[in-house]
Image (spheres, rainbow, N blue to C red):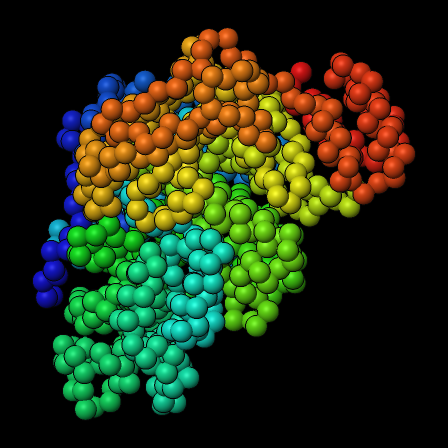
Amino acid sequence: MPELPARFRPPTTPQADPAAIVAGEHYRITVLTSRLFRLEYSPSGHFEDRATQTVVNRRLPVPSFEVLEGERLLEIVTDHAHLRYDRGPFATNGLSIAPRGSVINYGGIWRYGEPAPRSHYGFPVNMGGTARTLDEADGAVPLEDGLMSMRGYAVLDDSASIALTDDGWVAEREPGAIDLYYFGYGADFAGCLADFYRISGPQPLLPRYALGNWWSRYHRYSADEYLMLMDRFAERSVPFSVAVIDMDWHLVDDVPERYGSGWTGYTWNRRLFPDPPAFLAALHRRGMKVTLNVHPADGVRPFEEAYPAVAKALGIDPASDLPVPFDIADPGFLTAYFDLVHHPLEDDGVDFWWIDWQQGGVTSIRGLDPLWMLNHFHFLDAARRGERPLTFSRYAGPGSHRYPVGFSGDTVVSWASLEFQPRFTATASNIGYGWWSHDIGGHMMGRRDDELEARWLQLGAFSPVNRLHSSNSEFGGKEPWRYDAISAGVQEEFLRLRHRLVPYLYTMNERAHREGVPLVTPIYYRKVDVDTVRLLNEFSFGSELVVAPITSPRVASTRLASARGWLPPGVWIDFFTGLAYDGDRIVDFHRGLAEYPVLAQAGAIVPLTGPDDLRADVNPQTLEVRVFAGADGRFVLYEDDGAAGPRSVRTPLAFEWASGRFTVGPAQGASELVPAGRRISVVFVGLERFDAPQGRWDADGRLVVDLGEVSADAGAEVVLGAGLRLAENDVVGRVYRLLEAAQVELVTKERVYDAVRGHDDPAARARAVEVSGADADLVAAVQEIVFARV
């Protein structure tokens, strides 16, 4: 086998500390943590010490454990688990692990080979992981298992995964050998996930530009048409940071019939793109990175510009007119595939690749998934230029989080698709897959619905990656101006908001890499009593926010749509409306089209760019820091130089509720990476109005303090003084505005309004509203406001 370039040899530490291992002739047990065991059985007595496509690190600190060697049983006892094993072939009656201490425990003893129940009182026992694709999905699809379970444990079977050899290549595993990982974490979902990342590798840092808006459409653009579209977006102050060019960038219809279809291609269509380097440079000047779609399955055929060099490298006479077949399991093909096909296109200006593999899971190496192989080597190859690597491809099993970003596939345009997407995104974190990119707005079929498109884009703004996409239908484009004026305005505003959120998102990106906490996690990560919240379509969005996505149309009477969510204990404040809520309860949120249920806990600090600072690819020139009143808060803003091994700078932001003091601390680290004097404003949300000696109260009742240019090395502070109070909700005013827009009889409006004005006690108000004659939807919307804080 030819030697692979050094870039294809990722660093791994697959051999565990011998002190963590308990072994016999045919078995080996590795105590990785007090709650994580590796369980191997080998008929030949040979054990796997190489990395695999799922597990790349087993060299963890050895936890405290006790080994009890009985005549009949081997027992291993840690602080959290008790393993019993009869030293024979793994069997249900011979190998078990029981939890110690308090865990979710619906029969929480694991026994090898015992079928796990799929449901418990109507709830799925395993909370799910993710799926390879959402192609053609119109609603929910089955999910693979994740690591979180109502039984308090999960088992990951790594027996069939491919091994990674020291020279960077791959190898089959021993047939018949068993290689399992037992995770016994109870309700400590975050701890479970963090330890999964410890053995499978962390989520990589995404480039900053990946967190902005992506424009994508399956459409036969020309270079001029694409650039004119980007300029039209810019004229409307609608920002994009990634340009996705679907398959028509290459020859499709011009492929000679004898070579098959034009689905696979690597040669620019110069009728559409006469000067590819100039086109790519023009997008770069607009602050955008570029990815091209590739379907590699048909290999390299004689009509391709790269064919003569590839054929010669693989020993094929270019004059033979024989195609070079796709064989990702051939090291020679792999090297030529990158060096001779992709690298010249990258030299012209392509930044990363959209690997759109849909052609099965079989290669010449038993058990090797070509999709995983493509993801693995594309990601490693992308790092060769010294930049932070990025791939865009489909999910290929546990461990795929090392190769972000994920492309989920071609969904049907429907409310059912939108309903499933938040759950699908959050649940993927149960297998560590934190960077899904969906076809925001849906890909194909369905029907036009302006409200649906606005709601889907709102979800996109609060998704890991916000990529608008659609099919090649003449009527399927996602340009906001294609929709009615109200929907278009909402879409454009949320596209701007997404770019303004990048300082927060980029900090969460680094947190995901360093701490093993994905940007989006299911809301039940925050609650031990999982049963009460696990079916909610709600998620945490970083450390400061929770989102209850709206996935159904508005009702006619109120003109509001609703979503149900659980608020953790404490006071929570709506990011858009400023309405404050008591937590530790389930709430039905009702919102007009311009609003979305995004809640920040009292004390939360959310950094945004200034309103006009919409570049997602560079550290911002201006900051607007949202501070949510009612409690102390702390946030450390992370920024860096974007390199693969970055130089970074952290800026502490802190709020002391008792003293009313907000501080921007001196930058820590490479402060030269951020503006020496950055303009910063602080927006306090939820304060009771007072005579503020500094700042101004805006139309939404927020106190805005402009700090001017703040020295990165010195920082700044705002002292509002002691005695601050949370503002009381303006119940009467909010109900009035709700009623004013409602499409109901005037007499009904008057009765509801009188009921609210005529009582101060929330319970009395609610009773009066219930008997007012209003329909159930209007009553529910009013009662949300009445009971928000009691």
Name the residue nearer the viewer: 128 or 610. Answer: 610
**Residue 156 is drawn in which quadrant?**
top left
Examine the rendered structure and indicate whether residue 179 appears above or below residue 392.
Answer: above
Q: Residue at horizontal 87%, vertical 37%?
A: 746
Looking at the image, can residue 779 be seen?
yes
Point out residue 705 in the picture as x, y percentages from the top left corner.
44, 26
Residue 653, picture quadrant: top left
Location of the C terminus (image quadrant): top right
Q: Give the camera-side residue of 526 and 111.
A: 526
Q: Residue at x 47, y 63 (%)?
A: 232
Q: Residue furthest left?
A: 3
Instruction: Give the percent coordinates (x, y) of residue 740.
Output: 77, 37
Question: Viewed as shown, does residue 169 lie left or right of 247?
Answer: left
Answer with left or right where residue 65 lies relative to residue 141.
left
Q: Quadrant of the N terminus?
A: bottom left
Residue at 20% over, 67% down: 347
| Above or below 296: residue 704 | above
Residue at image position (20%, 31%) is 669
Residue 531 position (above or below residue 331): above
